[in-house]
Amino acid sequence: MSPELALVIGNKNYSSWSMRPWVALRQAGIPFREIQLWFDDTAHASGAEQHSPTGQVPVLLVDGAPVWDSLAICETAAELFPDRRLWPADAGARAHARAICAEMHAGFRNLRGAMPMNIRSSFPGKGMNAEVGRDIQRVSSLWSECRRQFGSGGPLLFGAFSIADAYYAPVVMRFITYAPSLSPAAREYVEAVRGLPAVAEWMAAARRETAFVAADEPYAQKP
Ligand SMILES: N[C@@H](CCC(=O)N[C@@H](CS)C(=O)NCC(=O)O)C(=O)O
């Protein structure tokens, strides 16, 4: 019998780490209950310590037991639901997918810091500097490389949907908000991710949110 899953997340407009496992589970059709917590002005998810020893979101509760950290959550979901093929089936592609997820998980700090995820807003040109430009260049080249090597079966990084697409979905959101100039291949990938039903559902919910979190809003004043 499948375990009962509950995913604890933050604000859909801002919480890039929450978006990754939510999109992975939803796009794969894995049923889960959503528990949404709200960020305070410092972007702390109020009440998260009730669910996770880190006091952060996301957390997946598997029959009530917490699995924290977005990558651990995605790995756990892939193991619990092997038929959903959350990782590519081919071992070489799977290793590559894990490498680019780890790279996202541990890196791109300049991009993440200067262009915080803010789905409902539009800030073209904001946040750009030389270091951010280098991060964007690296994202763009790793996307192109995946598409070229592994993407022949569909429009996503490994053709069909995988955790890698969920992992880069918040970068896609940033590219829509801050509109940096992108290669045609990167623009095509942005459109493919935005068109995923789970991503569209998350974006629609993010746009309905009105909470303003000062720590995540370097380019706007509190209304
Ligand atoms: N490495 C963690 C990062 C989680 C994280 O930074 N979550 C943010 C929200 S997106 C958070 O809960 N921040 C509030 C805090 O640190 O108090 C993951 O991948 O899940």
Image: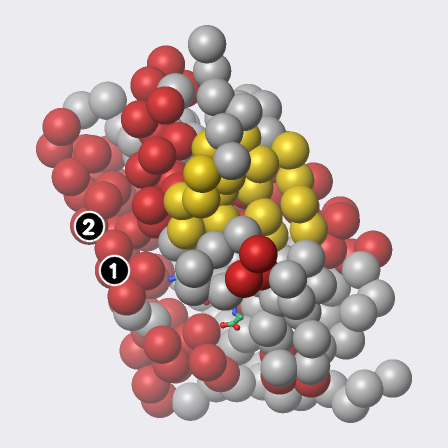
Q: Pointers 2 and 1 in contact (CB under 8 A)?
A: yes
Three-letter code, disc 2:
Ala
- Determine which quarter of the picture holds residue 162: top left
Front residue (pair 32, 104): 32
Front residue (pair 52, 217): 52
Q: What residue is drawn where x is 58% and y is 48%?
A: 8
* Rendered view: 90 above or below 147: above
Residue 39 in view of the camera: yes
Disc 2 is placed on an element classified as helix
Residue bearing the label numbered 1: 103
Residue 52 pos. (x, y %):
48, 55
Front residue (pair 175, 60): 60
Looking at this rendering, what residue extends furthest in the top direction?
Answer: 1
Residue 191 pos. (x, y %):
56, 46
Three-letter code, disc 1:
Glu
The local crowd at label 1, few if under 14, some if 14 to 19, many if 20 or more residues have their Cα within 10 Å, is few
Q: What residue is drawn where x is 64% and y is 33%?
A: 33
* Rendered view: 96 above or below 38: above
Residue bearing the label numbered 2: 99
- Determine which quarter of the picture holds residue 76: top left
* Rendered view: 20 above or below 80: below
Disc 1 is placed on an element classified as helix
Q: What is the C-alpha distance between the residues marked 2 and 1?
A: 6 Å
- Total tally of numbered discs in the picture: 2
Which quarter of the rendered picture does the C terminus lie within?
bottom right
The local crowd at label 2, few if under 14, some if 14 to 19, many if 20 or more residues have their Cα within 10 Å, is few
